[in-house]
Image (cartoon, helix red, strand yellow):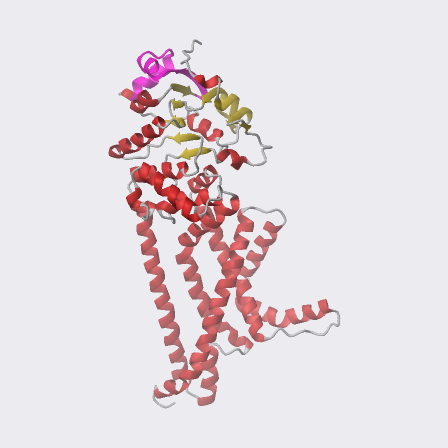
């Protein structure tokens, strides 16, 4: 192997950049879908809704006990078969790798976010609920304006930590031959043979983005620790 | 048992009627056979040792605690499990808590605006105007944009009073409003409550502030072990309580 040639990274950068954009958009979409669904799942469990609550609990337990890569496989291979059965003609209906990735990540992350939010819901002070009752606020307004904003605030460091993990996990889409940041690097590496440079470059990008986000989480923790001390 | 009963208009214009009220927590009788009428404009101070049921009683009045038997009628509406809209009663009953319970993620003025907008249907400018009027009344208008954590305990409790008043309640309940405060902040909160009393608000206050009771209470109600042991006008009650239990209690809080 030749000595390290960093100029190759500059040449490869546009392609790596497009991979990075895919990773970031998958992260953002999974975050939004996951948070929305996760909040709903957490509320179902929090209110102990009949029938729904045990279903949600099983769903969350299932998602949390299988590796994400297996969920991706399942979704990619099994869902087309199921859709085909449902449509009646029996022939598999392909979902496509990109849709598979977005849907799977959203559903998978929802399970993780829901656990974080469920714990956060229990952390809200009982006095907050009583104040809402005394002010005649409806249950909807209580959760919409008082409880959930505080939950997101209390849980924001953990939510962001989970999102950093999510960002790194998006690299698993290479099993679906999608071109995320890591996928872009590995495809280039196969073409130009510069494995070390390519994997080094993406490692640095992951490092920069994840550690910057971690710094942000740390500053959030500090900020809320101070705000909490005054309470 | 001989009870000294102050002359009060309680039976003529009852704002709150409590009859044979019973509340249990498991096998523990928190309240047994409570009878209490509160007239419009009347100020009642509830006192008694801790665990005597005084907080539970006022929490039953706005149905934060659900009673087991007996009747509670607030402003003509009976509180029952069957009641369709408990919130129509809660609208008329303001409550101030020992631990303030301000909303930490909302500014002072937003704390005061939320319920009038969501429950009373006020538009934002009206809600803001009303909030500012009442924040001025409790002398905290300068802090309107701050968050609760930036205020002292006394300031937070005055905001909590303003927040309750923004709903324009007919009666105000105070659950040990000064117990969580540093001594130097007690007075500013009591002064606010005295002013409110002078405006003619109907008030039921759980407090051990006997100076306040002397100054504003029409009646002092002494509770022990879930029952009303004695009630009377404050000067008589403090000078010459009828029951041994009240005497023992007063000795303890004076020394």
Residue A16: quarter of image: bottom left
Q: Quadrant of the C terminus of chain B?
A: top left
Q: Residue at x 34, y 53 (%)?
A: A224
The spot of residue A101 in percent (x, y) is 55, 71
The spot of residue B43 in percent (x, y) is 39, 23
Residue B200: quarter of image: top left
Q: Is residue A2 left or right of residue B77?
A: left
Tell me, yes or no, if residue B95 can be seen here.
yes
Residue that sits furthest to the top in the current view: B2
Q: Which residues are magenta?
A: B225-253
Residue that sits furthest to the right in the current view: A89
Q: Quadrant of the N terminus of chain B?
A: top left
| B227 part of magenta stretch | yes
Closer-to-camera residue (B231/A220): B231
Closer-to-camera residue (B50/A128): A128
Figure check: A39 above or below B231:
below
Figure check: B109 above or below A38:
above
The spot of residue B45 in percent (x, y) is 38, 23
């Amino acid at each position: 192997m030749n000595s390290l040639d960093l100029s190759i990274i500059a040449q490869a950068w546009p392609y790596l950049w497009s991979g990075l954009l895919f990773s970031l958009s998958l992260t953002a979409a999974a975050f939004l879908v996951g948070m929305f669904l996760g909040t709903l799942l957490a509320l179902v469990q929090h209110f102990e809704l009949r029938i729904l609550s045990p279903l949600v609990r099983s769903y969350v337990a299932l998602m949390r006990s299988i590796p994400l890569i297996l969920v991706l496989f399942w979704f990619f291979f099994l869902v087309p078969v199921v859709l085909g059965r449902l449509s009646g003609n029996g022939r598999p209906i392909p979902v496509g790798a990109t849709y598979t990735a977005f849907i799977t990540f959203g559903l998978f992350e929802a399970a993780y976010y829901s656990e974080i939010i469920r714990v956060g819901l229990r952390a809200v002070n009982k006095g907050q609920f009583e104040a809402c009752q005394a002010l005649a606020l409806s249950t909807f307004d209580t959760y919409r304006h008082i409880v959930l904003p505080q939950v997101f605030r209390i849980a924001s460091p953990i939510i962001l930590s989970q999102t950093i993990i999510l960002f790194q996990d998006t690299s698993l889409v290479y099993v679906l031959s999608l071109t995320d940041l890591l996928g872009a690097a590995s495809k280039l590496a196969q073409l130009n043979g510069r494995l070390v440079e390519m994997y080094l470059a993406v490692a640095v990008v992951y490092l920069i983005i994840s550690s910057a986000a971690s710094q942000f989480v740390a500053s959030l923790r500090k900020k809320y620790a101070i705000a909490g001390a005054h309470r | 048992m001989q009870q000294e009963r102050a002359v009060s208009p309680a039976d003529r214009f009852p704002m709150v009627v409590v009859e044979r009220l019973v509340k249990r927590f498991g096998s523990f009788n928190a309240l047994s056979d409570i009878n209490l009428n509160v007239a419009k404009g009347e100020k009642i101070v509830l006192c008694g040792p801790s665990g005597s049921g005084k907080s539970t009683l006022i929490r039953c009045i706005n149905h934060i605690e659900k009673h087991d038997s007996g009747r509670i009628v607030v402003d003509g509406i009976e509180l029952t499990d069957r009641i369709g809209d408990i919130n129509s009663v809660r609208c008329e009953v303001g409550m101030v808590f020992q631990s303030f319970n301000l909303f930490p993620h909302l500014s002072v003025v937003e704390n005061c605006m939320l319920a009038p907008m969501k429950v009373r249907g006020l538009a934002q400018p009206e809600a803001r105007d009303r909030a500012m009027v009442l924040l001025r009344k409790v002398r905290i208008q300068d802090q309107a944009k701050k968050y609760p954590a930036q205020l002292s305990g006394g300031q937070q409790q005055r905001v909590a009073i303003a927040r309750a008043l923004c709903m324009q309640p007919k009666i105000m309940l105070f659950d040990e409003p000064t117990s969580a405060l540093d001594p130097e902040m007690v007075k500013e909160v009591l002064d606010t409550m005295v002013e409110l009393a002078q405006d003619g608000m109907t008030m039921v206050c759980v407090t051990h502030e006997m100076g306040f009771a002397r100054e504003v209470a029409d009646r002092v109600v002494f509770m022990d072990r879930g029952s009303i042991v004695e009630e009377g006008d404050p000067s008589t009650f403090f000078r010459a309580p009828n029951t041994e239990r009240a005497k023992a209690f007063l000795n303890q809080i004076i020394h």
